[in-house]
Amino acid sequence: MTSLAFTVYGVASGMGSKRAFMPAGCKTPIITDTNKNLRSWQALVAEAASRAILDAPHWQLLEGPVRLTVAFYLPRPKSLAKRISAHTKKPDCSKLIRSTEDALSGVVYRDDAQVVEIVAGKFYAAPTASPHVDVRVELTNGVDRVVVSAAPQPLFAEVS
């Protein structure tokens, strides 16, 4: 199976809300994103993917259905109790996924519409680790149905 795995070091940034405005004399609206860090985050993702592609022999832009697996490791506040492990604060996991998915368009796969499966998690980085995102992109045949297991599964487990 064709797959690419890499790590992006830095604090992940999610998609912001879109705003549109019509300048005087303009016929089309100008659309802006409220997140000022979005472009730099997407550049980091594209750069990390490009470096991984250089190390992948015979890599080609993926065509067909794609599975995207991402694990976001965000900074842990020093004041947060050690017993808390779930990252339930902003940014939203879905916005983090969207920004990362968009950054890979034209780099790893032709278009983000090809992403048909997403496995994602949002966690606190270990106290000694830098914030980062682990990414895996692979071709998939899709699944007929999702089976929910009672036993926890590792995020990057091999899929047969």
Image (tube, helix red, strand yellow):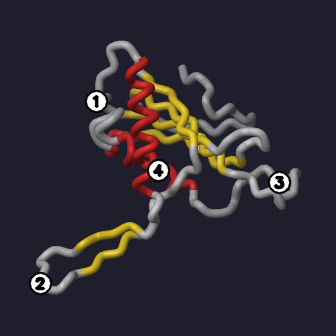
- Front position among marks 3 and 2: 2
Q: Check disc 4 and report its element: helix, strand or loop.
A: helix
Question: In terms of sequence position, does the residue under pointer 1 or pointer 2 come before the other?
Answer: 2
Which residue carries the number 4 mark? Answer: 41
Quarter assignment of residue 61: top left
What residue would you read off at disc 1?
63
Rounded to the nearest angstrom, the CA distance separating label 3 from label 2 is 53 Å
Task: Work out how far the residue at label 1 is from the one at label 2, CA to CA, in angstroms.
Answer: 41 Å
Mark 3 or 2 closer to N-term?
2
Q: In the image, residue 1 lies at what x, y percent?
A: 43, 18
Q: Which mark is residue 84?
A: 3
Q: Which residue is mark 2?
A: 25
Q: Secondary structure at mark 1?
A: loop
Report crowding for label 1: few under 14, some 14 to 19, many 20 or more residues within 10 A (C-alpha): few
CA gap, disc 3 to disc 4?
Answer: 27 Å
Q: CA distance from mark 1 to mark 3?
A: 41 Å
Q: Residue furthest bottom?
A: 24
- 20 or 23: nearer the viewer: 23
Question: What residue do we see at 46% from left, 34% from top?
Answer: 48
The quarter in which the C terminus is drawn is top right
The disc, 4 or 1, on the residue closer to the chain's N-terminal end is 4
Count of marks placed on residues = 4
- Distance, label 2 to label 4, CA atoms, is 33 Å
Task: Report how far apart the C-alphas of labels 4 and 1 lie in the structure.
Answer: 25 Å
Q: In the image, which is nearer the foreground, mark 4 or mark 1?
A: 4
Residue 55 visible (yes or no): yes
Give how far across and how far down residue 98 sits, in percent: 44, 52
The residue nearer to you, when weighing 131 against 58, is 131
